[in-house]
């Protein structure tokens, strides 16, 4: 049995018929073909699949595609506008906030909502807010620095 | 980052050139590759730690909609065991062998028995991932469960369940290094001796990208292409073609595209890669497999898992007279690709540390257990050696009543460059161990900390500082030397440098980047040497179809070995360019020098030909020297003459909560000496990540097997405690720079130092914090609050 789903991803309308058990992350990766959202675990620990769903940072492995019917989704591919990097992306680049790059899309999407909640986050706040995202390369040092950089530059733009 | 011709880029912290694709979601990892007609593999795995396979019934699975095929080990005729690439046998004259390595078979799909939870016994291939997984559940395996053994110190005991008929008593090998009688004599003359049991628990690498592969057999060309999460695609190809499948190497192309971390776990040839490659040839369709994280925990090679009894003999003056080490190393159920090297030549040879020691003897017994195979994990043998030495040295200082920093200073090998012959075979390249430690003590303000600690202890607070002054062997490795020690491969590296007609440069390197940033550092090296803008340089890696050969990336070898191979090719390019330029300038090649991106008559910048004009001439050779081939492309293989030995000193300040046993890191300070540095930003990042993994082992991480059932209790990210952002501090890092004389770049290697140093540093700090309670040692890691709390309670009960 397949069910119809429609959603808007990165400003594009998409619609498909999918199995009800298909996870949203697999829908995004395998059906829509946006492979920037990654799968690093099967227990919703790693956060590599974090997307923005209706403006909320959500692990795309924690829901079925059919539950996202009608949703507006932003993935890592939709963050840069007109070829210009979002300040969070720029911060990760400037501060060497990534090595292998696998956790990076999830980190950036988590940081996106974090900075909406805490436009001037303390180091402790950043670390606490990143609790749901694992990185094995950086030891988090430069991820913290990257988000601090982004916060400073986003404040400058407002 | 825009650079200009002539700008020196070696040593500059330039931003990474690979990052734009990663921060925009445009990286391409193996699981991102989609091919037409692709099929999906799901493996049927043992849920028993040890069980005979009576029968496998795939009939129900075969009827499942969408299923293309089900294969068991019996179907894979003509396929050989996965090879172990390191031999330890007396007949091969491998030094130190006491009992020969038992080369036990390891078939891609097991037919006779399963020997650990997760052992694959069948594969289901279907048109969709869901169909493959559903059908795998329908494969019926008639198991005959057998008793199992998982604990390192119980595997070789009398009566333990026998895992391989060819390895009686579950002993894989026995090996020794050093001088037994000199060590015995040293202990007889000692003022103080200490003996400690030191456990180095089993770890899981946990690269964020799970292993994956896609095999595509092309019936028209007879070629097989394998996309695989590999740190060394040529090694994968060689092992699979020559040893397992017996197919011609030139008909196989292995591509390791963007790879999401390795830490050792993606060096090895695994069952799934072989099975998918074989199945694609059978089915003539692409076959894809991506590990779930649970599969990764059960099948990625694990690391560490040593039980060690260590003894240290000290003179009254604090001089280290002798070190005696007896280690049992758990190899798991099978021999992974390089497993026997890790607890032997990568372990025993590092026990001299940075100290002048009177005598050393180390014996190692490798054992088989009903657990996932153990192989190299970041540091591989060297962290285990460093942990033993740095723990026992601090225990010795405490027994002698000497300050732990003072005792280290008394024993450092004095500064040298060229060679320092250790007591455990290897000869160090260059070192200034006291300088790194002095710098660390300064950054830490050691005296001030001890005063603060004394004051805080009066208030009942448990503050502690711990050190490690470590050494590591990297830049792996001289082929002749490792060959004599049992390696089945050479450990050189290759680099092809292609200069295009218009002056662009493409480098084809056998090193592989899975987070290390080679696309930046190697390009810096090339742009610096040729003094051309970095935009003119591209780095290609991870494709056996493009790169002549390669041994890959592990053992902190890319910059030192891979980089030197690039340098050799650049020198050849310059030499040929000099001859072309000399012809154009009507001068002698000996009178031509290469300055700021142009070939010029020595001392006459006005008589010059730019690099681009020379490269164009090489491809449009109208005005060209006789007896010189057209084209500008050079390939080099660099085989190092020795390992390189980075070193450094780390310190950690912790506070232990005496009521809960919780350890909080207050400061982490590191001084590393990795020789010369191409990109300090990238090296700092490496050090940070290494420290995090080392701290992880000290405080949280550990793979735990249930002894009765043999189940991996920590089999998911929910159960295995990986360090998170809010568990770690900012790191204070600095460097000393002692270039290596081994390679012309002066680079030692930076990939593993943090992991090697951090674990003993943190544990020493916790023990120091607990010293007022009469605690001088904690046997096992991780130092979870539960374990520390128990140690505190035990100490209280003793008083």
Image (cartoon, coloured by chain):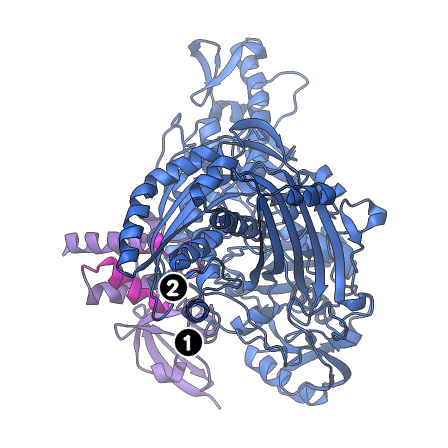
Chain colours: A purple, B blue
Which subunit holds the residue at mark 1?
A: A
Judged by depth in the image, the label closer to the viewer, 1 or 2, is 2
Toward which corner of the image does residue B156 lie, by quadrant? bottom right
In this rendering, position of residue A53 left or right of residue B109? left
* Mark 1 lies on residue: A61
Looking at the rendered structure, which numbered label has been put on residue B316?
none
Percent coordinates x, y for residue B140 in the rendering: 70, 87
Q: Which sits in the foreground, A49 or B348? A: B348
Location of mark 2 (residue): B724
- Residue placed at 55% from the left, 8% from the top? B587
Horizontal side of residue B787 vs B578, given as left or right: left
Nearer to me, B447 or B485: B447
Q: Chain of mark 2?
A: B
Marks 1 and 2 belong to one chain = no
Range shown magenta: A120-143
The CA span between labels 1 and 2 is: 19 Å
- Is residue A130 magenta-colored? yes
B669 magenta-colored: no
* Picture quadrant where residue B796 is located: bottom left
Quarter containing the C terminus of chain B: bottom left
Report helix, strand or loop for mark 2. Answer: loop
- The reply to whether discs 1 and 2 touch (Cβ–Cβ < 8 Å) is no
Total number of numbered discs in the rendering: 2
- The extreme left residue here reads A158
Q: Is any part of residue B623 visible from this angle?
A: no
Spot occupied by residue B261 in the image (x, y as percentages of width and height): 50, 57
Residue A134: horizontal and vertical position, in percent?
41, 64
Give me the residue at 69% from left, 42% from top: B185
Across and down, in percent, residue A80 comes to: 30, 58
Residue B232 seen in the current view: yes
Which quadrant would the N terminus of chain B be assigned to in this image?
Answer: top left
Vertical position of residue B51 compared to residue B360: above or below: below
């Amino acid at each position: 049995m397949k069910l119809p789903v429609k959603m808007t991803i990165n400003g594009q309308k998409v619609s498909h018929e999918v199995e009800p058990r298909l996870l949203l992350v697999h829908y995004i990766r395998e059906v829509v073909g946006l492979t920037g959202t990654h799968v690093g675990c099967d227990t919703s620990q790693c956060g590599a699949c974090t997307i923005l769903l209706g403006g909320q940072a959500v692990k795309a492995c924690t829901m079925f595609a059919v539950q996202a019917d009608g949703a507006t989704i932003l993935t890592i591919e939709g963050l840069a506008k007109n070829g210009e990097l979002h300040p969070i992306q720029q911060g990760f680049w400037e501060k060497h906030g990534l090595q292998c790059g696998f956790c990076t899309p999830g980190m950036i999407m988590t940081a996106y909502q974090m900075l909406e909640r805490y436009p001037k986050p303390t180091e402790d706040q950043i670390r606490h807010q990143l609790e749901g995202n694992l990185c094995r390369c950086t030891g988090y040092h430069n991820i913290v620095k990257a988000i601090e950089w982004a916060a400073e530059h986003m404040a400058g733009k407002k | 980052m825009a650079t200009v011709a002539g700008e020196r880029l070696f040593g500059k912290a330039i931003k990474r050139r690979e990052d734009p694709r990663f921060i925009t979601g445009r990286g391409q990892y193996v699981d991102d590759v989609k091919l037409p007609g692709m099929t999906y593999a799901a493996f049927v795995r043992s849920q028993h730690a040890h069980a005979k396979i009576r029968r496998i019934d795939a009939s129900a699975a075969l009827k499942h909609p969408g299923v293309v095929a089900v294969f068991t080990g019996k179907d894979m005729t003509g396929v050989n065991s996965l090879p172990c690439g390191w031999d330890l046998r007396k007949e091969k004259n491998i030094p130190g062998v006491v009992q020969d390595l038992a080369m036990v078979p390891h078939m891609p799909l097991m037919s006779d028995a399963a020997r650990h939870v997760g052992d694959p016994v069948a594969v289901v291939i279907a048109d969709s991932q869901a169909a493959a997984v559903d059908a795998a559940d329908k494969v019926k395996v008639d198991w005959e469960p057998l008793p199992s053994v998982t604990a390192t110190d119980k595997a070789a005991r009398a009566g333990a369940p026998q895992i391989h008929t060819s390895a009686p008593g579950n002993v894989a090998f026995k090996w020794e290094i050093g001088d037994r009688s000199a060590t015995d004599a040293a202990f007889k003359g000692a003022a103080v001796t200490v003996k400690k049991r030191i456990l180095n628990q089993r770890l899981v690498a946990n690269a964020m990208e799970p292993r994956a592969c896609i095999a595509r057999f092309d019936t028209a060309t007879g070629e097989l292409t394998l996309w695989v999460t590999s740190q060394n695609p040529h090694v994968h190809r060689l092992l699979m073609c020559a040893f397992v499948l017996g197919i011609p190497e030139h008909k196989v192309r292995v591509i390791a595209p963007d790879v999401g971390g390795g830490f050792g776990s993606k060096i090895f040839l695994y069952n799934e890669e072989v099975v998918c490659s074989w199945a694609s040839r059978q089915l003539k369709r692409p076959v894809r497999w991506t590990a779930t994280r649970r599969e990764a925990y059960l099948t990625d090679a694990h690391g560490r898992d040593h039980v060690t009894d260590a003894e240290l003999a000290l003179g009254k003056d604090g001089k280290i007279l002798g070190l005696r080490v007896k280690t049992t190393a758990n190899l798991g159920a099978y021999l992974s690709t390089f497993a026997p090297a890790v607890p032997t030549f990568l372990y025993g040879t590092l026990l001299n540390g940075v100290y002048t020691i009177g005598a050393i003897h180390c014996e190692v017994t490798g054992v088989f257990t009903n657990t996932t195979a153990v192989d190299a994990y970041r540091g591989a043998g060297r962290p285990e050696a460093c942990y033993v030495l740095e723990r026992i040295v601090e225990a010795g200082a405490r027994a002698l009543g000497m300050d732990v920093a003072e005792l280290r200073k008394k024993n450092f090998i004095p500064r040298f460059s060229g060679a320092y012959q250790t007591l455990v075979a290897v000869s160090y390249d260059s070192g200034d161990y006291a300088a790194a430690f002095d710098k660390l003590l300064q950054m830490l303000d050691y005296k001030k900390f001890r005063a603060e600690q004394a004051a805080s202890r009066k208030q009942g607070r448990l503050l502690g500082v711990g050190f490690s002054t470590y050494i590591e062997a990297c830049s792996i490795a001289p082929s002749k030397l490792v060959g004599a020690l049992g390696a089945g491969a050479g450990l050189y590296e290759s680099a092809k440098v292609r200069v295009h007609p218009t002056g662009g440069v493409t480098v084809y390197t056998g090193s592989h980047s899975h987070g290390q940033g080679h696309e930046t550092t190697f390009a810096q090296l090339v742009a610096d040497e040729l003094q051309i803008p970095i935009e003119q340089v591209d780095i290609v890696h991870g494709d056996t179809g493009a790169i002549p050969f390669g041994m890959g990336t592990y053992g902190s070898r890319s910059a030192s070995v891979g980089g030197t191979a690039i340098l050799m090719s650049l020198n050849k390019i310059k030499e040929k360019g000099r001859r072309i330029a000399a012809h154009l300038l009507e001068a002698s090649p000996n009178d031509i020098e290469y300055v700021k991106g142009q070939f010029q008559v020595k001392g006459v910048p006005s008589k010059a030909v730019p690099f681009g004009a020379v490269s164009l001439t090489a491809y449009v050779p109208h005005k060209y020297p006789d007896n010189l081939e057209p084209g500008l492309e050079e390939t080099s293989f660099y085989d190092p003459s020795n390992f390189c030995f980075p070193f450094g000193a780390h310190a950690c300040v912790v506070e232990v909560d005496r009521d809960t046993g919780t350890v909080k890191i207050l400061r982490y300070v590191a001084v590393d000496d990795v020789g010369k540095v191409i990109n300090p930003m990238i090296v700092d990042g490496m050090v940070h990540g290494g420290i995090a993994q080392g701290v992880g082992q000290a405080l949280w991480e550990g793979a735990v097997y249930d002894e009765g059932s043999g189940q991996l209790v920590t089999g998911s990210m929910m159960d295995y405690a990986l360090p998170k952002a809010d568990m770690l501090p900012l790191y204070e890092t600095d460097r000393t720079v002692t270039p290596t004389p081994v390679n012309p770049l002066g680079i030692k290697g930076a990939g593993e130092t943090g992991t090697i140093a951090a674990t003993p540093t943190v544990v020493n700090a916790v023990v120091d914090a607990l010293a007022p309670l009469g605690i001088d040692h904690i046997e096992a890691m991780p130092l979870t609050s539960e374990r520390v709390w128990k140690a505190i309670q035990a100490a209280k009960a003793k008083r």
